[in-house]
Image: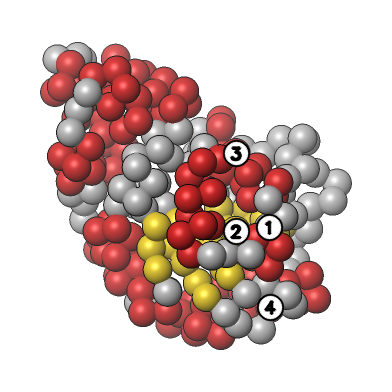
């Protein structure tokens, strides 16, 4: 990652007119650990569906995530579940860990052009999350897993669908994500790519697939502070 930068450079983003943000662990920091609740709910869903012990259910859940991009996609392919029921149960969480972030809201609002949330979660979850952060009103649209016909990032067809629907010029767009693999397609499409990482990455508890490697040439920037990164651009 020799070309990856850690400090935002306004000149690199001067032509950006579409700003695309992942949701979980991107618009709020990893240490908030909101996704842990969703993760627990998904394990419980798999356990109940297949009558498996929790440990075995979690292993299968992660296997489907790695093979198909989301646990949901794996469950749809192999078990024909109702995706809306799964999403409702997975996102039945407590959002009180999130608090209004006025500085982040101001930084997003100040960005020139349009802003989107592009998530493998649901619109309902995105609205609840962004609402709790006090940033929902600063976005022009939310593209969720339902709009993607339940085909998750990092599938190229899902990015194509998002770009086509919103008429995004990828040469004038930037993507913010917490998973390295979800930035591969955006980079290939010509977008600026920014990876959000946990603070104190070496001591943070992250899954192995969340970590960057020496071959992440598709990542232009890495930051552990989205607010500071965006403020420096405007």
Q: Could you tell me residue 70's position as x and y percent?
A: 39, 34
Q: Residue at x 39, y 46 (%)?
A: 148
Establish if 206 lies above or below 78.
below
The residue to which callout 3 is attached is 181
- Residue position marked by numbered label 4 in the rendering: 233
* Residue on which disc 2 sits: 175
Whole-number angstrom distance, CA of label 1 to CA of label 3: 14 Å
Residue 202, how many percent across, how many down?
Answer: 63, 42
Residue at horizontal 48 percent and vertical 64 percent from the top: 166
Q: What SS does tag 4 mark?
A: helix
Mark 2 and mark 1 lie on one chain; the one further toward the N terminus is 2
User: Few, some or many C-alpha atoms within 10 Å of disc 4 (few <14, some 14-19, many ≥20)?
Assistant: some
Which residue is label 1 attached to? 191
Of the pair 211 and 12, the residue shown nearer to us: 12
Residue 29 visible in the snapshot = no
Gap in Å between the C-alphas at discs 2 and 1? 7 Å
The percent coordinates of residue 68 (x first, y second) are: 44, 27
Labels 4 & 1 near each other (Cβ < 8 A): no
């Amino acid at each position: 990652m020799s070309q990856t930068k850690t400090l935002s450079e306004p000149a690199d983003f001067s032509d950006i007119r579409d700003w695309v943000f992942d949701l979980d662990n991107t618009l709020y920091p990893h240490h908030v650990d909101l996704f842990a609740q969703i993760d627990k709910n998904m394990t419980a869903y798999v356990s109940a569906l297949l009558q498996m012990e929790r440990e075995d259910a979690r292993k299968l859940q992660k296997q489907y995530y790695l093979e198909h991009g989301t646990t949901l996609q794996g469950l749809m392919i192999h078990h024909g579940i109702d995706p809306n029921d799964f999403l409702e149960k997975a996102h039945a969480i407590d959002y009180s860990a999130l608090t209004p972030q006025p500085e982040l809201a101001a930084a997003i609002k100040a960005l020139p052009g349009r802003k989107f949330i592009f998530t493998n979660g649901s619109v309902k979850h995105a609205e609840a999350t962004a609402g709790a952060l006090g940033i929902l009103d600063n976005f022009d649209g939310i593209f969720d897993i339902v709009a993607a016909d339940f085909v998750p990032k990092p599938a190229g067809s899902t990015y194509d669908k998002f770009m086509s629907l919103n008429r995004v010029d990828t040469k004038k767009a930037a993507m913010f994500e917490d998973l390295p693999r979800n930035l591969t397609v955006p980079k290939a499409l010509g977008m600026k790519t920014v990876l959000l990482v946990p603070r104190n990455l070496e001591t943070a508890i992250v899954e192995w697939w969340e970590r960057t490697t020496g071959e992440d040439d598709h990542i232009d920037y890495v930051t552990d502070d989205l607010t500071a990164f965006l403020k420096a651009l405007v």
